[in-house]
Structure formats: structure tokens, C-alpha cells
Image (cartoon, helix red, strand yellow):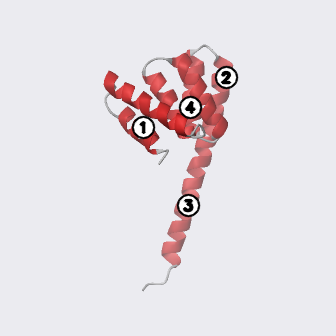
Amino acid sequence: MRRLPTYAAASILQGPAEAANLQLAQTLLNQAIAADPNLPDAYFQLGLLEQQQGRWQDSAAPLEKCVAMKPTLSKARYRLALAYSRLGQKERAKEQFALQQKYSQQEKDEVNAKLQEVTTFLVTSPPN
């Protein structure tokens, strides 16, 4: 239940970037974080929201919290790299881009391994 506001905010952020929508997303994310401050996805969405509004400085802190809780989340690493780049922190941005590439490749490898397992299962399963 505590993740529902995060999912709702993520859905809102996929739509038009109208002020009322952004304010609602902000409210939902603040509620989610207040209810459970250990939700990396809520911090990711909050950082994304800040970036959509051009508040790059404000986006860094929630993204840093997100990657501290979920270090392998490549999309958070990417967004954090963008924030650092916009803030003139080129070395930190470079480091985050490298981590994003590493974790993105790991995610792809995991998906491919799961697909291989499913394919193997389907091919070796006896027909009914």
C-alpha cells in the first residue's frame, strides 16, 4: 500500500507536464516518503520530477538517496549523472555514467538469462 503513491506519481509524470499534475505528483511522492523513507523508487521519481522542472540542484539529493538504497538501479545512476553534469561536476558525472553503463549491462544480462531459462523450459517440457 505504501508504494501506491509512488506508482501514481510515476504515472502522472508520464503524462503532460502541467503545473497541477506536477504538484499532485510532488504531493504523492512526499506522502510516500513520509510513510516509508526507505523507498528508493519514490526518491527516484522525486529526482525525476525536479529535473522535469529544471531544478537540477534539487534533483541531486533524492537521486543520491535512491542510489544509496539501490546502487544497481541504472536509470537512477543515469539521472544522477545528468544532474552532476548540469551542475558542472564533470568527474562525478563521468563516474555515474560509467556505473550506469555497468549496471545497465548487468540488467540486460539478467533479462537474457531469464529468457534463456524460459526458452529452455519451453523447449524441454513434455507436451501434455
Which residue does the numbered mark 3 point to in the structure image?
114
Q: Residue at x 58, y 38 (%)?
A: 74
The nearer-to-camera label among 1 and 2 is 1
**Which amino acid, mark 1?**
Ala
Q: Say what secondary structure mark 2 lies in.
A: helix
Query: In this orientation, does residue 70 appear?
Result: yes
**Residue underneath mark 2:** 92
The x, y position of residue 25, in whole percent, is 40, 31
N-term mark: 1 or 2: 1
Three-letter amino acid code at the position of disc 2: Arg
Q: Looking at the picture, does residue 97 appear above or below residue 89?
A: below
Three-letter code for the amino acid on which mark 3 is drawn? Lys
Vertical order, 60 against 6 (above or below) = above
* Label 1 to label 4: alpha-carbon separation: 17 Å
User: Mark 1 = which residue?
Assistant: 10
Which image quarter: residue 110? bottom right
Give the crowd class for mark 1: few <14, some 14-19, many >=20 residues within 10 Å.
many
What is the three-letter code of the residue carrying label 4?
A: Tyr
Viewer can see residue 18: no
Q: CA distance from mark 2 to mark 4?
A: 12 Å
The residue that mark 4 highlights is: 78
Mark 3 vs mark 4, CA separation in Å: 24 Å
The earlier-in-sequence mark between 3 and 4 is 4
In the picture, measured across the screen, residue 30 lies left or right of residue 113, that is left
Which badge, 3 or 2, is on the more N-terminal residue?
2
How packed is label 4: few (under 14 Cα within 10 Å), some, or many (20 or more)?
A: many
Going from N to C along the chain, the mark reached first, 1 or 4, is 1
For label 3, count other residues whose C-alpha is less than 10 Å away and answer few (under 14), some (14-19) or many (20+).
few
Q: How many marks can you see?
A: 4
Residue depicted at 55% across the width and 56% down the height: 112
Q: CA distance from mark 1 to mark 2?
A: 26 Å
Mark 2 is surrounded, within 10 Å at the Cα level, by few (under 14), some (14 to 19) or many (20 or more) other residues, namely some
